[in-house]
Image: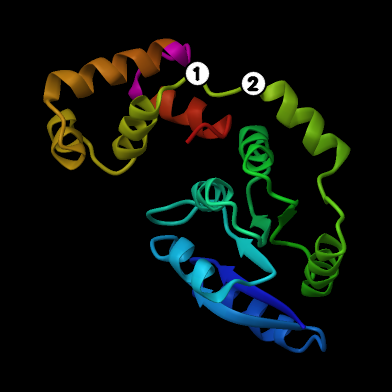
Amino acid sequence: MIEVVLVEDQAMLRSAIATLLGLESDITVVAELETGERAVEVIEEQSPDVVLLDVEMPGMSGLEIAAALAERDSPCLVIMLTTFQRPGYVRRALEAGVRAYLTKDLPVGEIASAIRRVVAGEMLISGEQLRQAMSSGASPLTTRESDVLRAAQEYDTVPEIAQHLHLSVSTVSNYITAAITKTDSRNRVEAIRVARDRGWL
């Protein structure tokens, strides 16, 4: 029996995938999570064969979870299941050792087939995904610059961002200026858009 942990923040989709995978004779979903906050801990407790991860979730993203699992030498295999085909996301997934990058519009039967193929040792990254990922380039943003841009998606003012990240206002302003320069943008909003489109956030 192939044991799967499913991490997906959309409740209806998560429930549907878990239910339909549960109908497969050789697959069982041992845990369902709606956010990434406890994902690494639960995955280590459950020791599943495969983890299905959404990319964009509140708190810890699927890419961050995959990277954390790679750092801990987790024996589970990771499959990204996402709406987003951004080259930067695929690149980061590959760097984290993800074995498949699938879109959510696939029938559950194909997701089940992908789970079996990954367990059998295959890597399901298309040639086009690989080409785009390699041409996207690594993010030029530092960790702190990325943190500030992520926070800027939720908070409108520099003082609010500074308070959220426990940094000074001047430090946050410097990080925003650096991010605007590195993304060749005109302002903070454009810098966020460019970074998101390239999968750097």
Residue drawn 22% across the image and 36% down it: 156
Q: Residue at x 66, y 86 (%)?
A: 19
Distance from disc 1 to disc 2, alpha carbons, whole Å, reads 9 Å
Q: Is residue 134 left or right of residue 16?
A: right
Magenta span of residues = 182-188
Which numbered disc covers residue 179?
none
Q: Residue at x 45, y 13 (%)?
A: 182
Q: Residue 132 in magenta?
A: no
Where is 37 relative to 192, above or below? below
Magenta stretch, main secondary structure class: loop
Q: At which x and y percent is residue 61?
A: 48, 51
Residue 195 place in picture, x, y as percent: 49, 28
Residue name at image x 34 percent, y 23 percent: 188
**Residue underneath mark 1:** 140
Residue behind mark 2: 137
Q: Is residue 184 magenta?
A: yes
Q: Are marks 1 and 2 in contact (CB under 8 Å)?
A: yes
Q: Quadrant of residue 29?
A: bottom right
- Image location of residue 191, percent across then percent down: 42, 23
